[in-house]
Image (cartoon, rainbow, N blue to C red):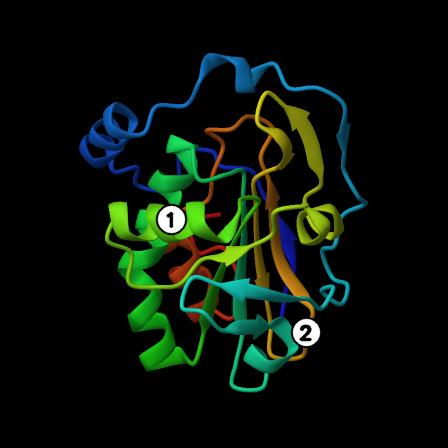
Amino acid sequence: MLAMRTVTDGTTTKPVVAARVMREQYPTPPSIDAGGPSTRPMSLLGTEAPDFTLERTAGDEVTLSETLESGPTVVLVNRGHWCSFCAEQLQTFDEVAYDLWFNDGVDVLPVVTSELGDLTEMRDRFDFDFQLAADPDGSVADQYSGTEETSHGVTGIAGTYVVDEDGVVQYEQVADHPADRTYGNWVRYFIRNDYEDIFA
């Protein structure tokens, strides 16, 4: 198996119409792009993913190591309930999450640096079928893609991680810009191609 690090480079299909609608409904304030001091850990690629337990919008708790008992897991670190780019990315994963779980035993864990109540509202507003995990203080984001100070307070830096069933990070993408994302369909192909980029 080949572990890799990539950046979003146009190899994925971006749902332009859906994105436009979501940005109108859930605008991202221009002030977030400036950002403040940030912390970014070393790359996790090829290493064991940090374990965590977080409360979810279903009212339960989810633990990464427990999801890995049944197969790989996709960890998505998102900035906040107010972020339109996050809503856009989450929609693409919501569309493939059931297929990945049913056919490949893959769990998708969206981790968002927001309070649980705000995430419940976000889940309902965008009609997500999967549950969002609340990381309000950014402690999990800090272990993965890092955090930064914005006008919204501590905010996770957007990151996408594919963790194999052995707990090893096979794919990592950390956003250089809030709009820089990996989408669900690409990750599905990546997992089904034994963690190799079929578009490379």
Q: Measured from the top left, where is residue 73 in percent x and y?
A: 53, 69
At x 76%, y 48%, the residue is 43
Q: Secondary structure at mark 2?
A: loop
At x 51%, y 28%, the residue is 178
Q: Nearer the viewer, residue 184 or 134?
A: 134
Vertical order, 20 against 71 (above or below)? above
Q: In the image, 168: left or right of 112?
A: right
Residue 51 is marked as none
At x 43%, y 81%, the residue is 105
Mark closer to the observer (2, 1): 1
Amino acid type of the residue that numbered disc 1 sits on in the rendered structure = Leu
Q: In the image, 59: left or right of 157?
A: left
Q: How many marks?
A: 2
Q: Measured from the top left, where is residue 31 in percent x and y?
A: 53, 13
Q: Nearer the viewer, residue 72 or 156?
A: 156
Residue 90 is marked as 1
Labels 2 & 1 near each other (Cβ < 8 A): no
Vertical order, 81 against 1 (above or below)? above
Q: Nearer the viewer, residue 3 or 82?
A: 82
Q: Which residue is mark 2?
A: 167
Vertical order, 64 against 91 (above or below)? below
Regarding residue 163, the answer to whether it shows in the image is yes
Q: Secondary structure at mark 1?
A: helix
Q: Measured from the top left, where is residue 14 in percent x and y?
A: 30, 37
How far apart are the two marked residues, 2 and 1, measured between alpha carbons? 22 Å
Vertical order, 151 against 142 (above or below)? above
Q: Residues within 10 Å of mark 1 (few under 14, many from 20)?
A: many
Please identify the quarter of the rendering in which residue 101 is found.
bottom left
Amino acid type of the residue that numbered disc 2 sits on in the rendered structure = Gly
Quarter of the N terminus within the rendering: bottom right
Point out the residue furthest to the front here: 117
